[in-house]
Amino acid sequence: MRPLAERLGHGPDARLLIINCDDLGSSHAANVGVYQALREGVGTSASLMVPCPWARDAAARYRGEDIGVHLTLNAEHDLYRWGPITHGPSLLDGDGGFPRTREDLWEHADVDEVRRECRAQIERAILWGFDVSHLDSHLGSMELRPEFFDVYLELAVDFRLPLRLGSASTERLVGFPFRRLAEEEGVVSPDHFVAVRTAGRRRAIERAIEELQPGVTEVHLSPALDSGELRAMSPDWPARVDDHDLVTSADSTLAALAARSGAVLVGYRDLRQLQRS
Amino acid sequence: MRPLAERLGHGPDARLLIINCDDLGSSHAANVGVYQALREGVGTSASLMVPCPWARDAAARYRGEDIGVHLTLNAEHDLYRWGPITHGPSLLDGDGGFPRTREDLWEHADVDEVRRECRAQIERAILWGFDVSHLDSHLGSMELRPEFFDVYLELAVDFRLPLRLGSASTERLVGFPFRRLAEEEGVVSPDHFVAVRTAGRRRAIERAIEELQPGVTEVHLSPALDSGELRAMSPDWPARVDDHDLVTSADSTLAALAARSGAVLVGYRDLRQLQRS
């Protein structure tokens, strides 16, 4: 198959960049931060966490931006909690909310309940008025285990949506050919995914953009407003505030870097249009 | 039976005042506001909403204050949501959370699921380390309908806890003798309850304290920090911020008023001690 960049109408050496903002709906701070990143910053798409307390607020603020569903089966914070909208017993930890870790989820979740919950999340987003642009998953829970990936791919096929997938290097690590499986079903995905951890996040993102490869690269950030709510939620709040600075500030390093490496900013809608054509 | 004030060791004309802070756990703003009211202000007890997103955070901040369980079967905000910890289907609205209104709850909830959810909320608070001082209910959902009141009273008996009850005037309105029923079971309650609506809240509270009757009066407030989170939650945010000022500020009108009407500040623990003696 022809390279994705070419199928999107660009030259063979073109460097396309999706700057995705995760965790929309997770908190008030994220809702304000993500929409600012899309409207005033260089964010090109975002991902909504439907089961979270602030998801309805995110829907009320929606004005047609490029937003997909961040399929959510974990609630990772110790002191701030949410749970499944379908109430599947195998999706709960002892607390009445989602489990905190992917490992706990992978060990206990029933695949039928996972399928029902994820489908409900997508349908709920559509019901709320979102023109859903793609699917990805919170903490990568759907992407890295074969039985969860099967559901993830099935939903992408059913709703005709592009998927976030790990890079080829991740594929070799997890031991099943998720990129080939998606391609066989005609599901479109960015060529490269820059997964960065909290520590050294800004530097890692900057380096990834400096060294941008030909093709479509997705970088993800979790921008959020600095607030008491955010600071109480999670010890990783400084990284979220830094992401917000990085993607929104007027003298955005990210925008300058992207321009310097000749990157063309695209959203997931471009990929969805290709997949549906 | 001897009047409550006397049974608490005061004279027959004594005016005792409980200043209760509701909605602990409902938001970050409420958690900060309620603990400030108890620690720096004149709040004498508070009520925890166990199923809310910020309840675990409220538990982490707990240092032995006089806190009861605010039994919660509604999520009244349009854009900020929570749901039951026992996931009883009859306790959900179409959204996957609690219904927004008491009327919706009263129409659809199965009493066995109500009992299971309320019991789980109390047990969860105990598990989290709260020395639960009393029971009351969010929006008065448990107090004003006979079949819900039966559960409310049963839990007060089982856990040997005092109850918030409406005043005698409310009893006449709702048409069943909840005060007599509680008394017959040996459950202790304040003599008077000052229920005030948002509009004119401060003035109504001030008047109630100026005209304080002999016996034990409970006034309830919903103090919360002024923040973006609070403002986005609900159009009633100014009343919550005003409650916070009223109960916490150094020149607290409430403290001055209480002193002027000769009120003795007490908590629900005083009532619990009496009930258990």
Image: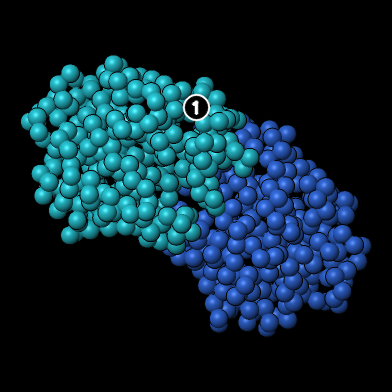
Chain colours: A cyan, B blue
Quadrant showing the N terminus of chain B: bottom right
Q: In the drawing, does residue A125 fall left or right of residue B277?
A: left
The kind of residue tagged 1 is Val
Indicate the position of residue B164 as horizontal and vertical percent values: 73, 57
Picture residue at 57% right of the left edge, 79% below the top: B252
Indicate the position of residue A197 as horizontal and vertical percent values: 37, 48
Picture residue at 59% right of the left edge, 44% below the top: B74
Seen from the viewer's position, the closer of residues A81 and A261 is A261
Where on the picture, by quarter, is residue A202? bottom left
Picture residue at 66% right of the left edge, 65% below the top: B63
Seen from the viewer's position, the closer of residues B149 and A74 is A74
Q: Which residue lies furthest to the right in this view?
A: B1
Q: Residue furthest left?
A: A11
Q: How crowded is mark 1: few (under 14 residues within 10 Å), some or many (20 or more)?
A: many
Name the residue carrying label 1: A114
User: How many tags in the picture?
Assistant: 1
